[in-house]
Image: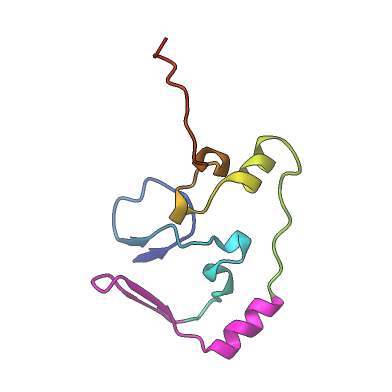
């Protein structure tokens, strides 16, 4: 079995997995355009993943795609949706990745 996901998950212990496809489908990433029945070729040695759908069809799908409604309007859920970066950039709060110095709490 091959699992291709943009999810942030743990516990997968067997089979070939491609995790953290970015950007995520929730924000319009590549997996948002995949449909049931599409052929996908995974070449692990070459580190490639190819969706066998022509460019015109992908553009039609992209034009028809609408983002899902945000499940949270406030609180931590909204902060997470607004501020967490994609997997390829660390899945961290974007404001934590800013350049700058942080005071060492142990340096008196």
**Residue 55: which quarter of the image?**
bottom right
Residue 16 within the magenta-colored segment of the rendering: no
Kindly give the residue lying farthest to the front in the view shown.
Answer: 100
Give the number of callouts. 0
Residue at position x 56%, y 66% in the image: 29
Residue at position x 23%, y 71% in the image: 45
Q: Judge whether 50 appears above or below 87 on screen.
A: below
Quarter of the image containing the C terminus?
Answer: top left
Position of residue 106 in the picture relative to residue 6 (left or right) = left
- In this rendered view, identify the residue nearer to me: 99 or 78: 99
Question: x, y (%) of residue 104?
Answer: 42, 20
Kindly give the residue lying farthest to the top in the view shown.
Answer: 108
Magenta stretch? 39-64
**Residue 4: which quarter of the image?**
bottom left
Q: Judge whether 60 appears above or below 21 on screen.
A: below
Quarter of the image containing the N terminus?
Answer: bottom left
Question: x, y (%) of residue 30?
Answer: 53, 70
- In this rendered view, identify the residue nearer to me: 85 or 12: 85
Q: Judge whether 78 appears above or below 54 on screen.
A: above
**Residue 21: which quarter of the image?**
bottom left
Position of residue 23 in the picture relative to residue 43 (left or right) = right
Position of residue 4 in the picture relative to residue 63 (left or right) = left
Question: x, y (%) of residue 75?
Answer: 71, 35
Residue 60 within the magenta-colored segment of the rendering: yes
Image coloring type = rainbow
- In this rendered view, identify the residue nearer to me: 76 or 34: 76
Kindly give the residue lying farthest to the left in the view shown.
Answer: 45
Position of residue 107 in the picture relative to residue 74 (left or right) = left
- In this rendered view, identify the residue nearer to me: 42 or 89: 89
Question: x, y (%) of residue 99?
Answer: 49, 41
């Amino acid at each position: 079995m091959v699992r291709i996901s943009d999810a942030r998950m743990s516990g997968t212990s067997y089979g070939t997995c491609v995790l953290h496809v970015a950007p995520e489908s929730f924000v319009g990433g590549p997996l948002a355009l995949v449909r049931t029945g599409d052929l996908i070729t995974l070449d692990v040695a070459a580190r490639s993943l190819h969706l066998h759908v022509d460019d015109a069809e992908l553009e039609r799908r992209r034009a028809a795609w609408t983002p899902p409604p945000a499940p949270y309007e406030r609180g931590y859920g909204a902060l997470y949706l607004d501020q967490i970066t994609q997997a390829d950039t660390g899945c961290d709060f974007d404001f934590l990745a800013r350049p700058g110095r942080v005071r060492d709490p142990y340096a008196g």
